[in-house]
Image (spheres, rainbow, N blue to C red):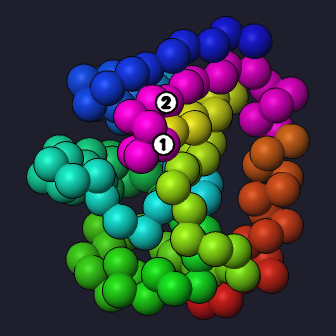
Amino acid sequence: PKVEYYQGREGLERLFNGILKIHKQTGEKEFFGYGINYSYTGMENFLNDIVQKRFEMNVRTRLLLPKNSKNIMEENTFGREFRTIDIPEQKAGLYIVGNNIYMFSYRDNVGIRIENKAISTLLASVFERDWKTAEH
């Protein structure tokens, strides 16, 4: 698989901008994964802009969050659909876009992108199973 490593705030910004780039280049209209129920301090405006741009590109966004995430689910969703599952609050997130898996941690200021069809297919299957059993 192709792997890219991102470090620091600038690295995380490149990671999230890279997700938008994948949507633009491939026309991929699905974005889903396991989210974090808070924004990285100092990056709130940047992340809100990313979410809004993804919404403007008509990308369907589905996120699974820990059960204690009701507050984020009540905010302006920009078309995001949230469901909750019985997991503790997370310090890392995992997103899937086409054949790309993005994993990142705000706490550690790091992220990676793995481009691999077999791995993304496996994780998409796990996500779909969890999505079907999650609370609305």
Apparent side of residue 69 relative to residue 20 in the rendered image (left or right): right
**Mark 1 near mark 2, Cβ–Cβ under 8 Å?**
yes
Whether residue 21 is visible here, answered yes or no, is no
Return the residue at label 1: 105
Whether residue 93 is situated above or below residue 132 in the rendered picture: above
Q: State the residue at coordinates (55%, 71%).
A: 89
Number of on-image labels: 2
In the image: residue 119, left or right of residue 15: right
The outermost residue toward the front is: 108
Residue 90: quadrant of the picture:
bottom right
Q: Position of residue 15 (x, y in %)?
A: 40, 28
Image: magenta residue range: 105-121
Considering depth in this image, is 93 or 98 the residue closer to the camera?
93
Label 1 Cα neighbours within 10 Å, binned few <14 / some 14-19 / many ≥20: some
Q: Residue at x 51, y 16 (%)?
A: 5
Residue 85 is left or right of residue 58, and the answer is: right
Q: Is residue 71 magenta?
A: no
Residue at x 63% of width, y 29% of height: 100
Q: Earlier in the sequence, mark 1 or mark 2?
A: 1
Crowdedness of circle 2 by 10 Å Cα count: few (<14), some, many (20+)?
Answer: many
Q: CA distance from mark 1 to mark 2?
A: 6 Å
Name the residue type under label 1: Ser
| Left or right, residue 114 beside residue 15 | right
- Residue 109, x across and y down, in percent: 39, 34
Q: Quadrant of the N terminus?
A: top right
State the SS at label 1. strand
**Percent coordinates x, y for residue 71 in the rendering:** 35, 86
